[in-house]
Image: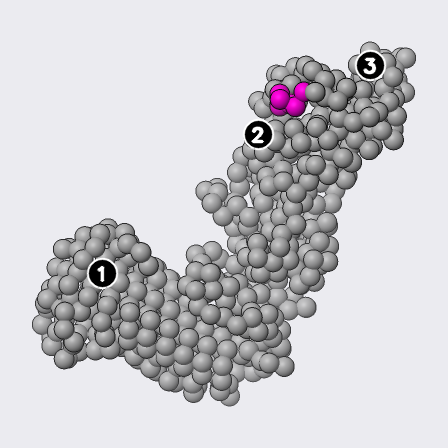
Amino acid sequence: MSGGLVARLRKPLQSRVDLGEVLAGSWAGLGAAEVASRPALLGGSAVPLGELFEVKGKPAGRLRFEGDLAMADRIGAGLGEGEVVVDGNVGDATGIGMSGGVIDVHGNAGARTGGAADDARRGMTGGELMVRGSTGPEPGSRMRRGLLVVTGDVAEHAGPGMIAGTVLVFGSAGRAPGRWSKRGSIVALGRVEIPPTYRYACTYQPDHIRLTLLRLRTRYGIMVDDRYISGLYRRYSGDLADLGRGEILAWTAE
Amino acid sequence: MKIRGVLIEDTFAEAFTMRVARLIITGRSVRWAREATLKLTGFATSVIGCKCEAAIERELAEDETPDGRPGFSVLLMTMSKDDLPKRLIERVGQTVLTCPTTACFDGLPDAPDRVGVGSALRFFGDGFQASKVIGGERFWRVPVMEGEFLVQEKFGMVKGVGGGNFLMLARSADAALEAAEAAVEAMSGRAGVILPFPGGVVRSGSKVGSRRIKSMIASTNDAFCPTLRAITETELPDGVNSVLEIVINGTDAEAIAAAMRAGIDAACRQGVVAITAGNYGGKLGPHHFHLRKIMAGAEA
């Protein structure tokens, strides 16, 4: 990512901080000082982002966070535009309720990544969220639209209550993926436990997965092995305890 | 003006504004991508009888297509913007949806005017269809007996040019055909250009209307028919016994002019007497391709 703003952590975080308001609404045209004045919640009190981060650069629709943000929650919550890159780990609820733009985490992410707020019917409604690492439980919960990619493992419960959209996991998709999914797609390139409420349909080559994986290569530079692009996938329909129009597409070496 | 002894007549081709879509058709192999493409572009020589004009623009390598499979790009053109989505839906639905392994993508992603194609074809899925938004574009997954048919929801539509042309006036049918084949070879595979007639060549050039039947839109171009030389107002020079035409459509006038230049140059060979072009006096079509301007610098 060239150009744009850079927010460098001034000193390691000692307690959890909520960055959910920093990129809410329109932000892509804001300058460094304006972004620095946006509120972060530290210990229940609002402080300007600039107290925690040194914000530099010129607005170009891009913001790069630098530093270990494992204690920072709700980065990019409700994001609707622009590109946010995080060089390192992030806390919980990254990108919850995002509707557009890109979040690209070069590290691990916590629970409910790309998920929904507790009181929200929908999680992500658009945009693309990359986690170049592993996530905690319940990534992509109640997703309505959008793409969540996890290059590592998911702890458990990937995509609970998905309405639509795609959660793509390169590593282990964990226990009980896709519970209560209506139309969502969970794409498992690694190990996956198919829940009993999913039913095997067929083994085939889904063209949209090929399209998605090629995009991950070209747009994000993610290494995608050819065997996944041209390979076969076992399709399981579910969650049959709900609408049952969702799917788990599990790559198979057969 | 003469090129290698072939007269380039001081005239122009008269062409029309049309609406264009570019389709990218891919398949598991070149064979199946081609099968769908040939069906889609079949019976699409002239809007007069086919409602649209379409042809392969060029073959695409795997790294040139959205899904990394072999494919073809096609230009499909209509006279009106209302016709374009109708023809796309008919043809993609009947020839690509039906063809094993294929998928269909928009080849004009930057065109602001978008027409629904997948958004209509999805209904074949009878409620079992599903969509995916990938890179900001929506695609429809239509379940079919083979697996799934993937088609982009909307296709770009731009203004293009249809009816660029030139005629090769030759001493014999063999010479006319050789010249036409050489011209097509030189014009094929160019971005933004298609030759919608069989093998790129037309033998039945037409004039507007009919001498005898008022309802006919077009009838044979008797002034260029060698067999009628003695009984009509012929425009054939002495020694000409066969004429073939190449019609060129494209996304823009510059692409057509460049293709015409290459084609005419290739057609100037032994056995060809003259190169001319079809027009309507310049009153019907806004695009005029003057042969001598196009060929300026190629004189020899």
Determine the chain carrying the residue at label 2.
B
The residue indicated by pointer 1 is A6
Relative image position of residue B283 (x, y in whole percent): 61, 16
Could you say whether the residue bearing mark 1 is in a helix, strand or loop?
strand
Q: How is the image coloured?
A: one colour
User: Is residue B297 located in the magenta-colored stretch of the structure?
Assistant: yes
Residue placed most toward the observer, A126 or A246: A126
Mark identifier at residue B237:
3
- Quarter residue B69 falls in: bottom right
Q: In percent of the image, x 28 and y 54: which residue is there?
A: A3
Residue placed most toward the observer, B138 or A33: A33
Mark identifier at residue B253:
2
Above or below residue B46? Residue A25 is below
Residue farthest toward the front in the current orientation of the protein: B300
Separation of marks 1 and 3 at Cα, in angstroms: 75 Å
Q: How many marks?
A: 3
Mark 1 or mark 2: which is in front? Answer: 1
